[in-house]
Amino acid sequence: MKLGLAIDLDTCVGCHACATACKQWNTSGTIGPLTDENPYGKDPDGAWLNRIRTYEVDASPHSKTVNMPLSCMHCEDAACVTVCPTGASYKRTEDGIVLIDQDRCMGCNLCAWACPYGAREIDPGSGTMKKCTLCVDRIYDQNLPEDERQPACVITCPTKSRVFGDYDDPESDVSKLNRERGGKQLMPELGYNPVNTYLPPRNPAQRPQGGRMLGKVKQIVNRIIKR
Amino acid sequence: MPNASELPQFEDHAKQEHKYTTCYMCACRCGIKVTLEDDKIRFIQGNPNHPVNKGVLCAKGNSGIMKQLSPAKLNQPLLRKPGSERGAAEFEEISWDRALDILTERLAKIRATDPKQLAYFTGRDQMQALTGLWASQFGTINWAAHGGFCSVNMAAAGLYTMGHAFWEFGDPDWDNTKYFMMFGVAEDHASNPIKLGLKKLKERGAKFVAVNPVRTGYQAIADEWLAIKPGTDGIFAMAMIHVLLRDGQIDDEFLIRYTNAPQLVVNTPGQVGDGLLWRDSEGQTQVYDQLTDGFVPANAIDVAPALLGDYNTPDGTPVRTAFSLLYDKYMDAQYSPEEAAKECGIDAETIERMALEMAHVAFQESITVDVEWTDWAGRKQSQFIGRPVSMHAMRGISAHSNGFQTCRALHILQALLGTIDCPGGHLAKPPFPKHIVPPIKPAKGNAPNTPLESAPLGFPTCPEDLVIDEAGQARRIDKAYSWDAPVAAHGLMHMVISNAVAGDPYPIDTLMLFMANMAWNSSMNTAETMDMLRAKDEQGNYKIPFIVTCDAFNSETVAFSDLVLPDTTYLERYDTISMLDRPISEPDAACDSIRSPVIAPDRDVRSWQEVMVEVGSRLKFPAFTNEAGERKYTGYKDFIVNFERAPGVGFLAGWRGENGDQHLRGAPNPKQWEAYEANECFFEHKLDLNQRYFRHANLDYLSLAKDAAWVGSTDQIVIELYSETMQRFRLAGQGLYDGPMPTEERHKERLTTYFDPLPFYYRPLEQQPEDTAEYPFFAVNQRPMFMYHSWDSQNAWLRQIMSQNYLYMQRERALELGIEDFAWAWLESRSGKIRVQVKHMEGVNADTVWTWNAIGKQAGAWGLSEDANEAKQGFLMNHLINELLPARTSAERMTNSDPITGQAAWYDLKVKIYPAAAGEEGSWPQFAPLKPLPGLKMSPRQQGYSSHKNVNLKRTWTDVLGNK
């Protein structure tokens, strides 16, 4: 299996629901707690596994605003795993999820430098590295209702812009969307072969105009129309 | 899938439990499912079965744990220490018994003497049916909620035109619309429902046009973004009306059958009665029937009314159809796309294209729903015809002093396209539509120890309905329903403190606030508002003698209170989201819901719901006591079950009747709360397909609505393109009304100018003086999605997303003014100046600057440290907005509001901007940090929340060996 996300940039409004759902689930999950520093003070910051960046493309007045959720891409050839000196970072053989063994991580930060997607963050409490687990403790938890066995970010997304599935299965939702919408890997030129894909904004069609063509108002409005 | 035995037990589900309740962090009121373990919250998620959010949940809802953990939660009632000053936050902790004794004693005295000495105003609460009932039972006319500074222009324009409205009373038909135009919706109102809807639109290839000066949030995914100048949406809409009329792209069948467009208007300029609808001797409005060539009652069936025409009545009175007036008005060159383009910044070609694209969808891409339904006259119809164009508008329209007329123009645009409550159009949500206008008149006066004769808020239709005294002066403290703001359907909360301190129209004794941060971001002119709250008379007494605040958290306003009553959080209380109030219905279903506690409070707090019932019982309100004067209800839950507004009609519509088997209407059910809890805390009554459209003229629906007491009759609800109500007030201004008329020139001028029975465009009042050159930029603000409408905590997770707001402006314009990215600059209006940090952007109207609202906080409030970014770099634009318009005479205090509805004109602001001097950094003005409240926890420097110890995944040997 090759598990991952497809993220629809045509409909992501940048609301951050996925980011806080992730924080909420995972602070009590397999790698929690996700610690916050200065939660009520200056420059509050903490460990997040998913963050939303917003960019503007082109100059006014033709600029386009793009909301870009970024989390671990679960790369097929993950640089973070390659560089990890303790073997804490690993990619699961059976489903491709990239994880960090919290018991073996020494917080050296090498993996975060190696990751071009900024998807790894040191937890200020534990001193260990944290990252997206694809909610491994949801997707495999047989005690959760079946439709809830998905990452927290996916079930909460208010514009349903996040889809989870197996890219090895050509009939999965993510594979189909990827084909139909021309999904893109992020920075494929770096060669890490990220699994997650981004669906680009659709190009709206030109719209026809007018067409009632009954004539001028003065001629049409006193048609005999029964009340 | 891996063998389950290889996986650890991630969660101990055996010790977890699931409870359902309703979110409270904004006005969407989504259903949530809360997982608990060891009395801690494991997870809050959207309820998939809930009609509002259908399983999804926003960033706020997902951060509920941090709200519950906030160190700013109030613990115990607080009393300002004798001798300490307001704002100093010197309090002693007192018991609830003492707090309630103090409050009851004071209120009893007020109620027995002059009940209007209590001003009771609530913020963004969701229980106005209860607080409004409480106020009328107390007998004070001085009650309102936050609608007056939020969206009354939308609500009033909708209710006065089509009987429902944008936002809570209606929704686009997300499943069928093919073209959606959204005006002035920041990132809010609504949250999850709009997001779910936009996804549906984009998947279907429907077109989404966003009209907004700023391209963030929803506008980011619009197919077309129109960077309009703030406050000019009205002329944009009227220019589109011009194009539709010019090209004959109108739904004449819809206008004739469902609107007052063919009705005859008296055309006698300068005479009493001019502009009113012409009525026969029985008071019935008339149309001209083309089949019989004569006048017939407007509600006659099988007649063929003329849309255009000038006639003379049998007694010689000249009359015109309302449509003739409408046609002439908008065909005038001032509403041509070319003229509109000069004002609104959208080019003429685009205006024209927008109108004609919508017309194409309405008339060439119509849809039908084939189902037999019964029209208002009892005739069977075989289908609903849908014009699949829809619109939505919010604060970018409403928070301007021309917002009422602008919003009415949007409704006229909808009516011309025939797209009101049809498949694919803008749909009403039960209990709407109502008859136009809803038959509730605002209470006019009060007497000691006596409930009001009607609700404090209502819908005036003529000068006789105003709440003014014999001399024509306002009776309400906020001057709602006075000549200043005759149709102030939600009151003017933003004027209460200013008016009370000025003693205009009179001083009050007690100001009671619930969930309203009036000492900070909910007031215009914040610094001076703080001074007003501290202002004393010559004897050294506070000008507002007693201020009571109920809140769950330590807001900036707590410090200015004399008595603080700590509320529960949303996860700790029983509550109702009632159809008598602001319903959560969907277009195809009548819905209401409850909150049921999922966690027990660890503090000495009481829900405001319980306190209302308790105080009402102690004060012996008739609704809360029996004939012997004994309390009738043991508490809030008992009250909700047993109180009936009319026979069979209570706060909750589901599971009524003694056995809980009746819905919408029925006798009280003692097990009603349990029935809601068993149904995940909501009730949903689906409408049959034949009841879902054209409900203004659908007998199948209107019969149900009458049975449920949503409407008083099954008469057709005739959409009022032409507003006779407006004309009555205008005649009063012109001295031509047969009834109360204003005596002051300024009022005559306002009524004559603004109360046009057909919408017209005018520049917002603040922008009319000739200082446009001095203050060249429009200045607006919006809430970010992850904080939209969330007034009651500075959430530890959400503030990591944003703890400082910038002033955003277009990059090129900023550089022209010598303002670099991230530079500090002064922003100045006629009322004052503030220092802000500027951030360049591209997606903004070049003449507009804007910021995120209510990010700026006072240090010490909300558990924030003295050096929190919100206090040091964040800022409020409120300091630049005055609650009063520039005075033309020294005595004049005219509110900075819509002259029709009194809606606070937050977005009318004009400013100039210039670089700050070298070394001038940090936001200004700064306020001293608030002292910690007694009993409040210290905010942690680090926190890592977990409901259980993390469970490490077991690694397979291949994973271990394969990697290192």
Image (tube, coloured by chain):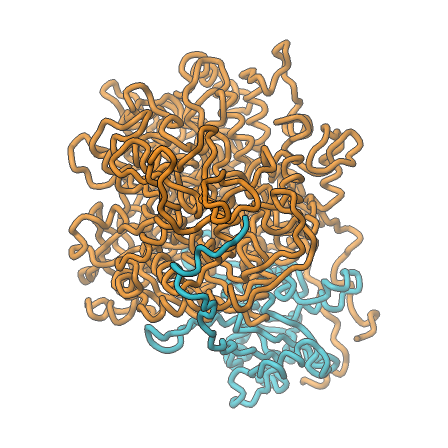
* A65 and B903: which is toward the camera: B903
Q: Residue furthest front?
A: B292
* B532 and B391: which is toward the camera: B391
The quarter holding residue B558 reads top left
Q: Is residue B337 above or below residue A1?
A: above
For the N terminus of chain A, the image quarter is bottom right
Q: Is residue A163 above or below residue B735?
A: below
Chain for colour cyan: A
* B802 and B807: which is toward the camera: B807
Residue at left 66%, top 22%?
Answer: B634
Chain for colour orange: B
Residue at left 41%, top 56%?
Answer: B184
- On the image, the x and y values in percent for residue B217 come to 46, 63
- On the image, the x and y values in percent for residue B751 come to 28, 37
Residue at left 48%, top 66%?
Answer: B208
- On the image, the x and y values in percent for residue B745 come to 20, 32
